[in-house]
Structure formats: structure tokens, C-alpha cells
Image (spheres, rainbow, N blue to C red):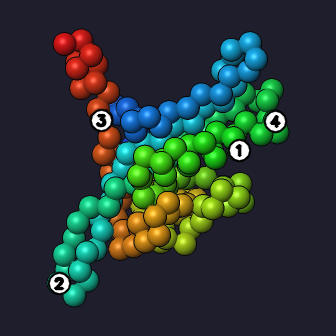
Amino acid sequence: MGPRWRRKSSEKLRRGRLPAEGLAFVARDADGRVVGTVRLWDVMVEREISPRRGEIGNCRALLLGPLAVDPAMKSAGIGSALMRHAIAEAARRGHGAVLLVGDAPYYARFGFSAGKTGALAMPGPYEKHRILALELDAGALDGARGVLKAAGRKAEAARLARAA
């Protein structure tokens, strides 16, 4: 993830939140050691519902990341397997879209593109061309615009609920 990951826009959306329900995955080797992980997080952004009347609503989506693989296991297909599993499970759970900040050439193989992200922004520094999206339901991001906001369960609230 690199030494500056805490300052990244994606980390700002994840900080203090839990991953989306059922959407945190770990890959293990034959000895049970963790060799990869990926998580998806609930986010929302404004959606223009009726352009003529100026009506605005919320568009919910998932933010994918980080996707991390043990450097010793690179090129073993672990990252691809985690991506395919995460996308399939997000679709199975009824989510409409997945967003991420990443390299288009890598994520294009999973269907991600910048085609629906032109009106979206991250909260903090980021490179605009790296915001990518995959619609799991066609049109899920139609009218989406503005800065992404965290929308998931807060970590502290979950800890308190378990303690009760």
C-alpha cells in the first residue's frame, strides 16, 4: 500500500468505517498464511434525479480497495481471483456499482472504465483519470455527480453493538 496510504483519498473514505457487509475477502495459501486481501466499502454520491426540476437524490455504490497481494505471490492469479470473487459477491448482494482508484489497464479486464466517472470526485488529492467504475446494474451511476462520501457502518458503533 505504500508509506503514504493514510493520506490517500480512498483511505479517507474508509477511515473509521467497516467494510460493506459480507464484502471483505482474504486469500490464504495451503499453510493458511494470508497471501491476498480485498475489501469493498459503502459510499454514496449525489444523483441528479430530474434535471429539468433540479431534483437531487443519493446514489449508493461500493468503493473497492485496497487490493493487496503478497509480493512473493505476484503473478499467481491471486489478485484476479479476489477481484472476480468480490465483484460476483457484490452483484449477488444486489449492489449496483463498484468504484475504485487504480490503473485502468489492470482493472479494464474486470470491466472497469472511466466512462461513468467524469462527474465524480474523491475527497482529497487524487488523479482524475484513475477513478474507474463498473456498473453491476446498467444505469446504476446515471446522473451520479460530486464528491464521494463514506456511507457504511462506523467501526465504533459496531464495536459497541458487539459489547452489548
Q: Earlier in the sequence, mark 1 or mark 2?
A: 2
Task: Read off the residue under disc 1.
Answer: 80
Can you name the residue that lies furthest to the bottom here?
A: 52
Quadrant, the N terminus: top right
Separation (CA) of disc 1 from disc 2: 43 Å
SS at mark 4 in the image: loop
Of callouts 4 and 3, the N-terminal one: 4
Q: Which residue is mark 4?
A: 76
In the image, 164: left or right of 36?
left
**Helix, strand, or loop for circle 1?**
helix
| Horizontal side, residue 84 vs residue 48: left or right | right
State how far apart marks 1 and 3 are (Cα). Answer: 27 Å
Residue at the front extreme? 92
Kindly identify the amino acid type of the residue bearing the numbered disc 2. Arg
Between the C-alphas of marks 3 and 2, the distance is 32 Å
Q: Residue at x 70, y 44 (%)?
A: 80
Residue that carries the numbered disc 2 in the rendered image: 53
Judging by the rendered image, the residue that carries numbered circle 3 is 153
Badge 2 local density, few (<14 within 10 Å), some, or many (20+)? few
Residue type pointed to by label 1: Ser
- Residue 113 image-quadrant placement: bottom right
Mark 4 / mark 2, whichever is N-terminal: 2
Locate residue 151, reporting x and y percent.
30, 45
Q: Are marks 4 and 3 in contact (CB under 8 Å)?
A: no
